[in-house]
Image (cartoon, grey):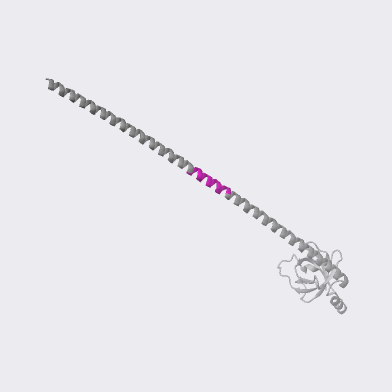
């Protein structure tokens, strides 16, 4: 009987020890889980902070690139405005130079024509007058550009009504006249214009309109 009681006491003690060990294992496991959770939380916080830093760096880089692009655009716009102003200045200078050149040419032409009267072909026209009688035609005239007449005082006319080589006297409605030589026929097919004078002749006659009335004596 005594031995049986001793066995029961030993068994109860062993059972209590195993319960204590199991409880300790559970607490250790819980501690391990809590430590694992804490470490995972720390890792998550670290990764989130790193990602935030990365996004901040990227945003800083993007803002810098935007600033650089805006600066480059502004510099390109400034260069474009400078180039445009330079081009406008060059165009204005060229126009002014051409205007001065034309005015000088017209002044020289007026001085030469005053000395030579009606131009280079005036003497030839006078010799024709002695040989025969003259006829006069009226019509509408226009201007063509030519290098002749500005320095040599030689004036030319285009017409379909007279043969090439004829020397004529051209008189405007305000009684200004020059002598010119027929050098070619008119290229136009229409009949609105019967004569074309070179621009030097128009300048000495004081013509400013595109078309004007003239009397042609031959």
Q: Is residue 64 magenta?
A: yes
In the image, residue 176 above or below residue 39: below
In the image, residue 1 above or below residue 64: above
Where in the figure is residue 3, as x and y percent of width and height?
12, 22
- Can residue 42 be seen by looking at this rendering? yes
In the rendered image, the residue lying farthest to the bottom is 131
Where in the figure is residue 190, as x and y percent of width and height?
72, 66
- Can residue 210 be seen by looking at this rendering? no
In the rendered image, the residue lying farthest to the left is 1
Residue nearer the viewer, 120 or 2: 2
Classify residue 116 by image quadrant.
Answer: bottom right
Give the left or right position of residue 67, taking residue 177 as reference: left
Where in the figure is residue 71, as x and y percent of width and height?
60, 50
Residue nearer the viewer, 125 or 201: 201
* The residue stretch that appears in magenta: 54-67
Residue nearer the viewer, 139 or 77: 77
Residue nearer the viewer, 142 or 93: 93
Which residue occupies 50% across, 43% down? 56
Q: Main secondary structure of the magenta part?
A: helix
Classify residue 17 by image quadrant.
Answer: top left
């Amino acid at each position: 009987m005594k031995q049986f009681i001793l066995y029961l006491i030993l068994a109860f003690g062993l059972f209590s020890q195993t319960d204590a060990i199991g409880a300790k294992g559970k607490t250790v496991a819980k501690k391990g889980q809590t430590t694992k959770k804490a470490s995972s939380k720390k890792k998550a916080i670290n990764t989130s902070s790193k990602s935030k830093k990365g996004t901040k760096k990227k945003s800083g880089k993007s803002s810098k690139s935007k600033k650089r692009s805006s600066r480059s655009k502004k510099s390109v716009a400034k260069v474009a405005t400078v180039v445009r102003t330079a081009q406008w200045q060059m165009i204005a200078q060229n126009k002014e130079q051409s205007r001065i050149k034309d005015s000088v040419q017209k002044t020289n032409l007026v001085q030469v024509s005053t000395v030579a009267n009606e131009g280079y072909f005036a003497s030839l026209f006078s010799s024709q007058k002695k040989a025969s009688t003259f006829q006069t035609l009226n019509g509408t005239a226009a201007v063509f550009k030519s290098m002749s007449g500005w320095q040599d005082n030689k004036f030319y006319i285009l017409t379909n009504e007279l043969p090439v080589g004829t020397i004529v006297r051209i008189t405007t409605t305000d009684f200004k006249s020059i002598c010119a030589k027929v050098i070619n026929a008119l290229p136009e097919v229409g009949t609105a214009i019967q004569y074309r004078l070179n621009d030097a002749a128009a300048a000495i006659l004081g013509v400013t309109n595109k078309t004007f009335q003239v009397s042609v004596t031959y």
